[in-house]
Image (cartoon, rainbow, N blue to C red):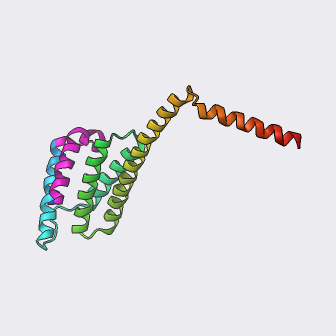
Amino acid sequence: MKYLEDFKKARAFLSGYSYRIFRKSREEMEKELESIKSDIDRAMRNQSPQNYNSKKITERLLRLSDYLLRGVIPEEFLEGARSLAVIYYNWAKAAEDKKAMTKAEFVVRFIDQSLTLYELIIVGRQIIEDLRRLRNTRPRSWELSRHYLEKLLEKYKEQ
């Protein structure tokens, strides 16, 4: 199932970033993830979540978005953070908490756009590198074009 994949990525993400972002140990965040997984499983069986805490999800999403807005973000961090935001979204959806769902959606959209921007930066760097290499070369066609332009300017000045 897709959501199990998200839990796997979120766990990997939390192993490196749980204290840095949430000021919680990896073990504490692992327990929280298990609790969330249990609630989502209950919701899939049409039962209400037992451990949902609106204040906690809002705090987690604010800390996550704050960290995303402040730093240089490696791509592997973005994938794990996105998975965690999707998990928080599903948890809020199970509890029918529209405000938390909106916040989680924002984080997911922000990360998706950051990935696109990150890819654009990579392509831009490659283009800049190519242009630097070309800067010191002058293809023959440029010399011909310059000569042609000079002749056109001479004719224009004569008129």
Above or below 82: residue 121: above
Considering every residue shown, the one lying at the far right of the view is 159
Query: As rendered, which of 141 and 8 lies closer to the eye?
Result: 141
Q: Position of residue 131 (x, y in %)?
A: 52, 33
The correct choice, above or below, for 30 with respect to 86 in the image is above
- Name the residue located 15 percent from the left edge and 69 percent from the top edge: 43
Taking the spot 36% from the left edge, 44% from the top edge, the residue there is 67
Which residue: 18% across, 41% down?
Answer: 26
Q: Is residue 7 above or below residue 130?
A: below
Tell me residue 34's x, y (percent).
Answer: 13, 54
Residue 65 in the image: x percent, y percent?
A: 37, 50
Residue 22 x %, y %: 28, 45
Q: Quadrant of residue 123?
A: top left
Range drawn in magenta:
2-26
Q: Residue at x 14, y 69 (%)?
A: 44
- Which image quadrant: the C terminus? top right
Left or right: where 141 falls relative to 157:
left
Q: Mainly helix, strand or loop, the magenta region?
A: helix
Q: How many marks?
A: 0
Q: Say whether residue 27 is magenta.
A: no
Quadrant where the N terminus is found in the figure: bottom left
Residue toward you, 117 or 107: 117
Is residue 3 found inside the magenta-colored segment of the image?
A: yes
Identify whether 17 is placed above or below 10: above
Which residue is the extreme one toward the bottom?
A: 46
